[in-house]
Image: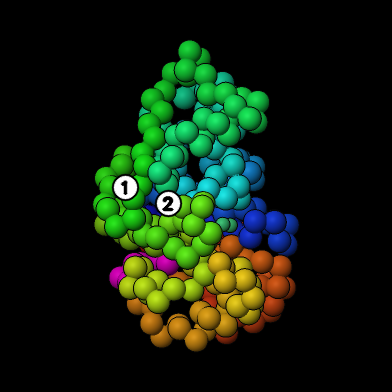
Amino acid sequence: MNSVLFVGTSDAFGAGGRRQSAYLLRGESGTVLLDCGATTLTGLSALGVEREEIDLISISHFHADHFSGIPSFILASTYEDRRKKPLFIAGPIGIEDRIRKASSILGHPINNANRHFQLNFIELVAGAHYSIGPATLTPFATYHPPEVKPHGFVVSISKTQVAYSGDTGWFGELPSKVAGSDLFICECTQLEPNYPYHLSLDELSDNSHKFDCGRLILSHLGSAMRSQSEHRGFEIADDGLLVNL
Ligand SMILES: [Zn+2]
Ligand SMILES: [Zn+2]
């Protein structure tokens, strides 16, 4: 792993004028995009990232701010980029059906006749290990509405490990799931634990001593988190942040 580019760092609602969740992991073996919201194509373009560079898109759960950009990504890859290189899309069980239906509902069904690249869907199950394209993925279950099949990931590329919480409320096993990572991208939507399915700065402060990661950066920031000037020693993300590892 060489770097992580924070493409989008807001909550579901674009707090602070920022983009929805998306993180670009680059290594010698290839490039992985973690999550792809409605604003992700705009972000990639603004940051000068070619879509064709991306080998694997991995989706944490079926909330719109994490996967609704994929129909446009496939459409642009087919007609605008005339992509040739295979694309892997990994996500919770049902990922292919969900993406195909979403593409149809949004007006651009996936067209196999005009597509000149392999489109490979991979279903992920928590606790298993997957070698997909340039990366190794270990998904873990998180505490978020169960109907959206929520997961976080530990991703290894080129001997570097990045952990990502996806969306989650606090659960006791979280520190052990991400232990030993070079970077942990951790959601922190709110200041106080008002809504149990998202993390708060209060909970992370109380449990910060339990994390054993090279670097921990808070993201998926809601409006209250964003407007706060001090974050009790935590590093917070912003769109366009580049972290070299
Ligand atoms: Zn979200
Ligand atoms: Zn969510």
Task: Please name the residue that numbered disc 1 is placed on.
Answer: 135
- Secondary structure that dominates the magenta span: loop
Q: Can residue 240 be seen in this view?
A: no
What residue appears at the point 50 percent right and 86 percent down from the top-left corner? 206
Between the C-alphas of marks 2 and 1, the distance is 10 Å
Judging from the image, what secondary structure is the residue with disc 2 in? strand
Task: Please name the residue that numbered disc 2 is placed on.
Answer: 25
Looking at the rendered structure, the kind of residue marked 2 is Leu
Near-viewer residue (154 or 198)? 198
Q: At which x and y percent is residue 224?
A: 70, 73
Q: Residue 58 carries which label?
A: none
What residue appears at the point 47 percent right and 65 percent down from the top-left corner? 143
Magenta-span inclusion, residue 93: no
Asked if marks 2 and 1 touch (Cβ < 8 Å), the reply is yes
Looking at the rendered structure, the kind of residue marked 1 is Ala
What residue appears at the point 34 percent right and 50 percent down from the top-left corner? 125
The span shown in magenta is 179-184
